[in-house]
Amino acid sequence: MDIQVDRNAVEPSSSSPSPLYYLLNFERALAWVSERYDDLLDAIEREFASAFARLPLASRALLVRMLMRNGPRFRTSKLNYAEIGCPLAAAAPLIALGWIDAEPHLSIDDLFALATRPELERIFSEAVALRRCSKSELRELLRAEYGAQTRPYRAWDATSDEQVFELEITPVCDRVRLMFFGNLHQSWSEFVLADLGVYRYEAVSLEPSARAFQRRSDVDAYLALQACREALEGIDGVDGIAALRELFGAVLGMPIDNAWLEMRRAKLFYRIGYRAEQMRNWEFALEVYERSQWPEARHRRMRVLERCARFGDAFALVTRALEAPENEAEYQRAARMMPRLARRLGQAVQRAAKPAGFARSTLTLMRPAVPVAVEYVVQDHLDAPQAPVFYVENTLINSLFGLLCWEAVFEPVPGSFFHPFQRGPADLHAPDFLARRAETFARCFAQLDSGAYHDTIWRHYERKAGMQSPFVFWGALTSSLMTLALDCLPARHLKLWFARLVSDIRANRSGLPDLIRFWPTDRRYELIEVKGPGDRLQDNQIRWLAYCAQHGMPARVLDVRWEGEAEAEVDGDGGIDGSSDRAVAGVTTPDAGVTP
């Protein structure tokens, strides 16, 4: 039997939701996890759910309030909520259970996170008398004086009559949160934003068995990978390589038998390899990259081999990438490296076929008196009643795709939706995302041939307004922009853009030109990528521009120069395979449009 998402859990029931809406939603999530993950819960987690239900209302509410805030330490004076009352009374049952530590020992850093500057000056008045320094300088002084000492809050501030609470139950609640959301980047505040109407989610029919994890070991592996990722952020300095090697060994030794988690591990390997590159330990970087199946790892190996002067190995790897590229980005980068490596090896330079040339022109303007983004300066200069110009960048084409293909994106394919707070399917970037929804996408795309797409896009624009989507940028859409777009953009161009977008969502959702200009009378348009002095085209922008040129779509680069100022140099990317985008530019043409 399907379970239909309770829309009351994600939409406000009135303009003034219950003061305890956050608690009600947390209890829904806890019941959801208890029901769907019963076979994955251990005794500690089951006892948490059972004990939580037996707590007084105020105690349950206080715990959820603390879980939803940045912690894990809180001053009692900052825990005043009308619906809870006295935080000391509400906390007493939580302290008895060991879920809150009522007297945690605090370091200088912990104290600085809790106290204000005036309070710190009062607490340490003798130690820092007459010193004029910033809060960070004051912290350094006190670190030097007190070292690693830790004390209860009242031992630091004997004049205070308040307490500091520290959450001890967070690891259990984080595991519950992970099982509910299927990730750790969503927090319990998601409930608040939904109940207040800030976020709205598509209601997707979910099977009772729908869940992100099938085994407890998968949850353990996710948490272990997350801990290693956080540890990586703190690795630097002289002992960094030793710490990196230890971290690499820990990640390598994790028992993972899950394709989704294996890809997370591959990305972590990639991050470790990149940090080794930054530390200029080329051999270790190669060792790590060779273990990673992350899409960009092979390109990093090419770069590192060249750094190591292993030109033959780099040439062989680049050759394989050109023969069977992982994606357009890898082919583009490999093609740029090949001539340089061939010259190093004394071989004939065989350049890859150049992408279709795209238009490029120059516009000289007065530099604005007040600093403003160059895209807006150009928009204002070009905009005219008969040819309005909009700053859209990646928003318009993505949004039109998302509105046309709404049913395909939110199709409840097994393994794609687990809970009612998903912005999009969990497998959005999976290699088989399109294949698993091929029939539905085909029906959506067929509307571009029949003309039915106008009605579908408008229907979703009106009925789904404000609803979370991985493609639709509601804030950028207006009815006037939509009208112009649907009148002036040919269906065959929309179909080509959408096909490229869905073929590699991770790579192709960005890189689209900044501006779009319409000629409503002629029902034509032009895409314009704006580059200020010294700015250069990014690789994904070059790929989109070349694609448009290949298919006869009007798109060009507009280089802006400030009147009376010397032309700035266009820098490369600073890397070993950096190159100026000017070598890729095509023929300069006047304003161009297209008539459908």
Image (tube, rainbow, N blue to C red):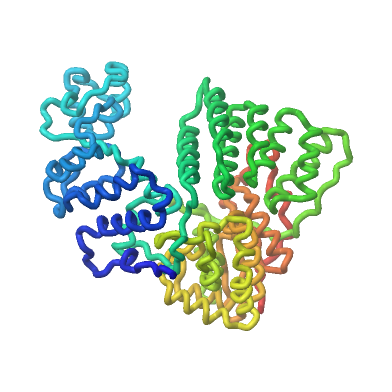
Percent x, y of residue 279: 58, 27
| Image position of 149 (left or right of 86) | right
Percent x, y of residue 477: 46, 69
* Residue at (63% x, 26% y) in the render: 281
Q: Nearer the viewer, residue 84 or 415?
A: 415
- Compared to residue 256, the image places residue 358 above or below, namely below
* Residue at (19% x, 29% y) in the render: 153
- Compared to residue 161, the image places residue 462 above or below, namely below
Percent x, y of residue 194: 33, 61
- Compared to residue 146, the image places residue 409 above or below, namely below
Quarter of the view holding residue 227? top left
Evaluate whether residue 109 shows in this view. yes
- Which of the image's four quarters has the C terminus? bottom right
Evaluate whether residue 490 shows in this view. no
Quarter of the view holding residue 123? top left
Percent x, y of residue 293: 64, 43
* Residue at (24% x, 35% y) in the render: 114
- Which of the image's four quarters has the N terminus? bottom left
